[in-house]
């Protein structure tokens, strides 16, 4: 299904959440992640935030809840039911786990590994059953913590699903970061047995967990709505984003984004639920630097044009001017923000990058020339800074996740669409609402 590109162009009206309403984080909250923005916004509104955990693995790789010490370190109101999704460590009927099938495979043979997919499907079914059982337990505990007259917002933050076999990450590093002899085609990777395994794992963790959340919270939703309360769901997607190029906003995307196929699944689940009257919306957010995005070489290049959007949409606003000033102070004295925009204009208008910016073909696989140009752009832009450890992309990432949180909280009260794109224009407009 080819999605229709629907960017949000105007900031939504103020949400109607009140003190005592409940925001439920479905998936563990880590530092430097998208969901921190909506959590901070909810806390400002006086909402009660209930957190969850994916749990941890013990020395025998058995899933467990957090220990008392781990709960203290989290310092959050957590329902301590481990919500780890996926099936990579789930035994098939033979007792063999999916990761065991890749055991002993050498990096030089990454594209030759063979997998028994009958066993994979057995493990997948067992993983789904286990996950749904734990989610049902989570919902049982959650209901005890929701006040009778509270509106509820579920925030789906589940993502990832890289199988925990030792060979997978080194092989993926060749796809996402490889150069020269170490470059690997993402299309070749995706068509191997290992790639097919990853595709199934991504789909379960990133996509289908939204279905399970909506399905297994049905009882809470219906009881709350019968009492006259609002119940909504938001999820974090990625499907490319608008950035400013030569004064106009144009769609672009990072490639190769193999998780993109599962993000499409996430969108389709939201569309189906929305058509049945569930208030749910997936927000395709701009790229930011997170702990998990560090695997993607050059993903930060598309963050730099946000300075142009901030100048265009928020010039004169004190908060925006401070952001721009802070960004400019990180650059070498012989460079400025105009240099950034001039370079990114040339980069996104180049023939190579234009070839990899085709919405109807998303997600696109990588190419050697494209990866080299992205790597060069990343290195060049980092080189404009005084200190490569202090980049403006860190500041801009915070701008994005805060603005996304504000927009998502406001729009979630009565979502107009099951899928939205949040481009740099709406991020800048939202940032300009700050005093």
Image (cartoon, rainbow, N blue to C red):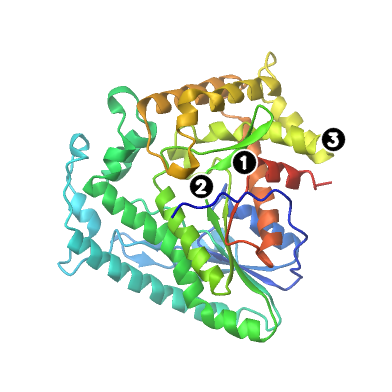
In what element is the residue under mark 2? loop
At 47% from the left edge and 61% from the top edge, which residue is drawn?
268
Q: Quadrant of residue 190?
A: top left
Say which label, 3 or 2, has the lower sequence index: 2
Q: Position of residue 183 (x, y in %)?
A: 31, 29
At 22% from the left edge and 37% from the top edge, which residue is drawn?
107
Mark 1 vs mark 2, foreground winner is 2
**Neighbourhood count class around disc 1 (C-alpha, 10 Å): few under 14, some 14–19, many 20 upward:** many
Q: Label 3, label 2: how many angstroms apart (C-alpha)?
A: 31 Å
In what element is the residue under mark 1? helix
Q: Quadrant of residue 72?
A: bottom right
Q: Position of residue 269 (x, y in %)?
A: 47, 64
Q: Nearer the viewer, residue 159 or 355?
A: 355
Q: Quadrant of residue 182?
A: top left
Task: Identify the disc placed on residue 316.
Answer: 3
**Neighbourhood count class around disc 3 (C-alpha, 10 Å): few under 14, some 14–19, many 20 upward:** few
Say which label, 3 or 1, has the lower sequence index: 3
Say which label, 1 or 2, has the lower sequence index: 2
> Viewed as shown, does residue 163 lie left or right of 415?
left
Task: Identify the disc placed on residue 397.
Answer: 1
For the residues labelled 3 and 1, say whether their Cβ atoms are less than 8 Å apart. Answer: no
> Viewed as shown, does residue 294 lie left or right of 151?
left
Q: Can see residue 43?
A: yes
**Neighbourhood count class around disc 2 (C-alpha, 10 Å): few under 14, some 14–19, many 20 upward:** many
Q: Can see residue 165?
A: no
Q: Nearer the viewer, residue 110 or 239?
A: 239
At 17% from the left edge and 70% from the top edge, which residue is drawn?
93
Q: Label 3, label 1: how many angstroms apart (C-alpha)?
A: 21 Å
Q: Position of residue 163 (x, y in %)?
A: 32, 52
Seen in the picture, residue 144 relative to 237 is either above or below; the reply is below
Give the residue at mark 2. 239
């Amino acid at each position: 299904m080819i999605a229709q590109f629907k960017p949000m162009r105007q900031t939504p009206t103020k949400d109607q959440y009140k003190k005592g309403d409940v925001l439920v984080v479905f998936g563990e909250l880590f530092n430097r992640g998208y969901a921190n923005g909506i959590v901070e916004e909810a806390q400002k509104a006086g909402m009660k935030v209930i957190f969850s955990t994916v749990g941890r693995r013990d020395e025998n790789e058995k899933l467990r809840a957090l220990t008392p010490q781990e709960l203290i370190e989290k310092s959050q109101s957590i329902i301590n039911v481990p919500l780890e999704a996926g099936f990579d460590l789930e035994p098939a009927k033979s007792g063999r786990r999916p990761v065991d099938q890749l055991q002993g495979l050498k990096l030089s043979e990454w594209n030759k590994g063979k997998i028994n997919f009958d066993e994979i499907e057995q493990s997948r079914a067992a993983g789904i059953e286990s996950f749904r059982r734990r989610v049902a337990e989570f919902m049982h505990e959650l209901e005890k913590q929701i006040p009778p007259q509270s509106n509820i917002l579920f925030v789906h933050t589940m993502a990832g699903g890289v199988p925990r076999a030792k060979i997978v990450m080194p092989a993926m590093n060749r796809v996402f970061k490889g150069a020269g002899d170490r470059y690997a085609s993402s299309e070749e990777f995706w068509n191997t047995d290992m790639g097919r395994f990853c595709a199934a794992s991504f789909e379960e963790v990133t996509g289908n967990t939204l279905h399970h959340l909506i399905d297994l919270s049905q009882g809470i939703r219906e009881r709350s709505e019968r009492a006259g309360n609002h119940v909504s769901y938001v999820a974090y997607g990625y499907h490319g984003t608008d950035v400013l190029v030569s004064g106009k906003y144009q769609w672009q995307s990072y490639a190769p984004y193999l998780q993109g196929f599962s993000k499409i699944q996430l969108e389709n689940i939201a569309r189906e639920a929305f058509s049945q009257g569930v208030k749910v919306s997936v927000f395709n957010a701009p790229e930011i630097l997170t702990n998990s995005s560090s695997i993607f070489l050059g993903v930060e290049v598309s963050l730099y044009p946000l300075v142009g959007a901030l100048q265009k949409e928020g010039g004169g606003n004190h908060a925006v001017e401070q952001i721009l000033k802070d960004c400019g102070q990180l650059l070498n004295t012989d460079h400025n923000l105009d240099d950034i925009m001039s370079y990114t204009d040339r980069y996104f208008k180049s023939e190579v990058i234009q070839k990899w910016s085709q919405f109807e073909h998303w997600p696109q696989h990588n190419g050697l020339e494209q990866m080299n140009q992205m790597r060069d752009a990343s290195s060049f832009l980092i080189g404009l800074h005084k200190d490569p450890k202090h980049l403006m992309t860190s500041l801009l990432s915070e701008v994005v996740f805060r603005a996304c949180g504000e927009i998502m909280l406001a729009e979630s009260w009565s979502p107009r669409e099951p899928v939205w794109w949040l481009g740099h224009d709406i991020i800048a407009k939202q940032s300009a609402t700050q005093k």
